[in-house]
């Protein structure tokens, strides 16, 4: 589950999971899309996606777990967009906790990537305003509001890590110039690390190359154009 970063790397990540683990493409449920939120209905251009919380992916995971008995492993990425849609850090955490509660009833392993934006050291108010106007032109959230929300969410996720969920930290070092998206030539390290976490002990051999990440980006652009913008192709059945 995620937004633009996951959309860019989905193809590479799925390829790695299939190659190095006993995972079928049909076993993987996805809810993603540029600008997508967990609480808010968001998107880009003329495209709007349902909030991840309400899109049906959890119900599908519950049904699949009951019928197949296969262990559920969940990944939460890109959880910062809702801040820019006006949701407070507390509201976002409440929604995330509700989703984790449902997954824990399935005895799922839950992995979360904290918000990768380092508001303390990498993004000053001027930079924030430029990024807000570029990616969220309708947002009125101030730098201080965003900063407080990011610090609250990342701090609480750190407190929750352990038995309830597991964090995949320090991914901000792989971000590009906009401090939001992973750098094209560094993102392969992100997908390698995430695949290793999702696969557990069997993931030690996973390696995602730079070319894989480049192909994944191109695949995402094609999918978003054909499926979401133009609507000439349907998204796969396991997409929500």
Image (spheres, helix red, strand yellow):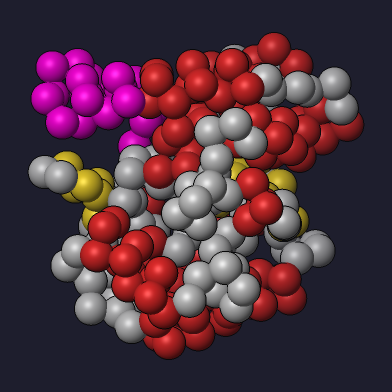
The residue depicted at 63 percent of the width and 36 percent of the height is 186
Percent from the top left, x then y, of residue 236? 34, 20
Q: Quadrant of the C terminus?
A: top left
Q: Quadrant of residue 117?
A: bottom right
Q: Quadrant of residue 210?
A: top right
The residue depicted at 32 percent of the width and 66 percent of the height is 130
Q: Nearer the viewer, residue 60 or 224?
A: 224
Percent from the top left, x then y, of residue 219? 39, 19
**Residue 146 relative to residue 28: left or right:** left
Residue at the far top in the pictured view: 19
Q: Is residue 54 visible?
A: no
Which region is colored magenta? 221-240
Q: Nearer the viewer, residue 110 or 151?
A: 151
**Residue 135 relative to residue 74: left or right:** left
The residue depicted at 30 percent of the width and 19 percent of the height is 222
Q: Is residue 76 above or below residue 130?
A: above
- In the image, is residue 231 part of the stretch drawn in magenta? yes
**Residue 132 relative to residue 28: left or right:** left
Q: Is residue 5 above or below residue 80?
A: above
The residue depicted at 72 percent of the width and 71 percent of the height is 158
- In the image, is residue 52 part of the stretch drawn in magenta? no
**Residue 206 relative to residue 238: left or right:** right
Q: Nearer the viewer, residue 60 or 205?
A: 205
Numbered-mark total = 0
Percent from the top left, x then y, of residue 138? 17, 67
Percent from the top left, x then y, of residue 185? 60, 31
Q: Nearer the viewer, residue 138 or 133?
A: 133
Q: Is residue 82 visible?
A: yes
């Amino acid at each position: 589950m995620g937004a633009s970063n996951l959309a860019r790397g989905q193809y590479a990540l799925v390829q790695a999971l299939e190659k190095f683990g006993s995972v079928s493409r049909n076993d993987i449920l996805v809810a993603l899309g540029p600008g997508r939120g967990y609480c808010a209905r968001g998107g880009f251009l003329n495209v709007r996606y349902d909030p991840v919380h309400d899109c049906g992916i959890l119900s599908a995971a519950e049904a699949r777990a009951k019928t197949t008995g296969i262990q559920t492993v969940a990944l939460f990425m890109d959880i910062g967009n809702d801040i820019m849609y006006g949701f407070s850090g507390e509201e976002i955490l409440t929604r995330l906790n509700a989703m984790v509660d449902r997954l824990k009833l399935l005895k799922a392993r839950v992995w979360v990537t904290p918000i990768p934006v380092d508001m303390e050291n990498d993004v000053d108010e001027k930079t924030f305003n430029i990024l807000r106007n570029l990616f969220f032109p309708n947002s009125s959230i101030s730098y201080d509001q965003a900063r407080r929300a990011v610090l609250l969410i990342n701090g609480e996720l750190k407190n929750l890590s352990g038995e309830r969920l597991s964090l995949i930290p320090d991914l901000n070092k792989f971000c590009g110039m906009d401090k939001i998206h992973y750098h094209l030539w560094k993102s392969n390290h992100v997908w390698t690390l995430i695949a290793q976490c999702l696969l557990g002990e069997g993931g030690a051999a996973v390696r995602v190359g730079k070319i894989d990440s480049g192909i994944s980006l191109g695949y995402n652009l094609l999918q978003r154009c054909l499926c979401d913008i133009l609507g000439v192709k349907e998204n796969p059945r396991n997409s929500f």
